[in-house]
Structure formats: C-alpha cells, structure tokens
Image: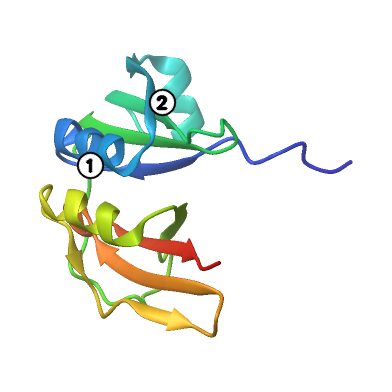
Amino acid sequence: MTIQRMDNVAIVVDDLKAATAFFVELGLELEGEAAIEGRWVDRIVGLDGVRTDIAMMRTPDGHGRLELTKFHSPPATAAEPNAPVNRLGMGRIMFAVDDLDDVLTRLRAHGAELVGEVVQYENSYLLCYLRGPEGIIIALAEQLN
C-alpha cells in the first residue's frame, strides 16, 4: 500500500493571528479555524492537557495545506528563531509565485526579511529564502519564461 497524498504540514507558532495574516498575504486561503482539546488529542500527540487553536490554510490550487497551531497548554517549547537554514529538522517551505518582487514587497510589510539574496538559477527561476513570522523559513520560486 502507498500513501494517497500529503494532507498538510503543521507549524507550531506563538502568534497565530500574525502567522495567519502572513500566509494570507502570501496567497494561501484560510480554510478554517478551530479550538482543539480533549483526551483524544492528548493520546495522538503524547502530551497531557492539550489545548490548541489551529488555522488551516490552503494553497489556491487546492493541493497543499498548511496547519498553523498555537499551543495554550502545555506551552510550546522554545525554538531558535533565527536558526541557520542548515539546522536539523524541517528547513523551509517552498512556494511557486508569479511575481517574486511583488510577493517580497507584500511580505516585508508583515516583517519578512531575506535570508540571503534573490538569485537567478540558470535561465529557469528566480529564487530566494526569507524568514517569516517566528523564524519560519519560506522559499519562493518564480519561473522565468
């Protein structure tokens, strides 16, 4: 048996409202919000007394989803907000965009900063890494004609 598809990627955040606004500005659509708690979630994640709020985001094509999770209980553990891109664990999330300069301008208004530079890969793509809310690294790719 093989998997059917990847359903979503989850990111734990401290400021759910700011993270949601950032990803809406990027172009994801807010699919829904919910408070999650109860013994069933405790059993799934292996923690006791879980109380969270989530925002489920979806890419415009409907094929990708991002779950933003704010833990109220137990509190989230600290992360290094400016960790380098070569740290162990999830490194970044990449999105294809139509106009890289426009997206960068809009995301900078939400506190995003370039990690390095915007570069051109061969004659195929403009690429960059940027740091979004709470140190989340986002990669953007604009395909060149």
Circle 1: residue type: Phe
The tally of labels here is 2
**The one of 72 and 59 positioned closer to us in this rendering:** 59
The mark nearer the N terminus, 2 or 1, is: 1
* Position of the C terminus by quadrant: bottom right
**The one of 47 and 128 positioned closer to us in this rendering:** 128
| Residue to which mark 2 is pinned | 42
- Residue 85 position, x and y percent, is 34, 75
As drawn, the label of residue 102 is none
Circle 2: residue type: Asp
Which image quadrant is residue 112 in?
Answer: bottom left
User: Could you tell me which residue is drawn at 38 percent across and 35 percent down?
Assistant: 28
| Residue to which mark 1 is pinned | 22
Structure colour scheme: rainbow
- Residue 142 position, x and y percent, is 45, 62
Labels 2 & 1 near each other (Cβ < 8 A): no
Circle 1 packing at 10 Å, graded few (<14), some (14-19), many (20+), is many
- Residue 51 position, x and y percent, is 27, 22
C-alpha separation, residue under disc 2 versus residue under disc 1? 29 Å
Q: Looking at the image, can residue 78 be seen? A: no
SS at badge 1? helix
User: Could you tell me which residue is drawn at 15 percent across and 37 percent down?
Assistant: 18
User: Could you tell me which residue is drawn at 84 percent across and 43 percent down?
Assistant: 2
* Position of the N terminus by quadrant: top right
Instruction: From the image, state whether disc 2 or disc 1 is nearer to you.
Output: 1
Q: Is residue 123 above or below residue 111?
A: below
User: Could you tell me which residue is drawn at 48 percent across and 36 percent down?
Assistant: 59
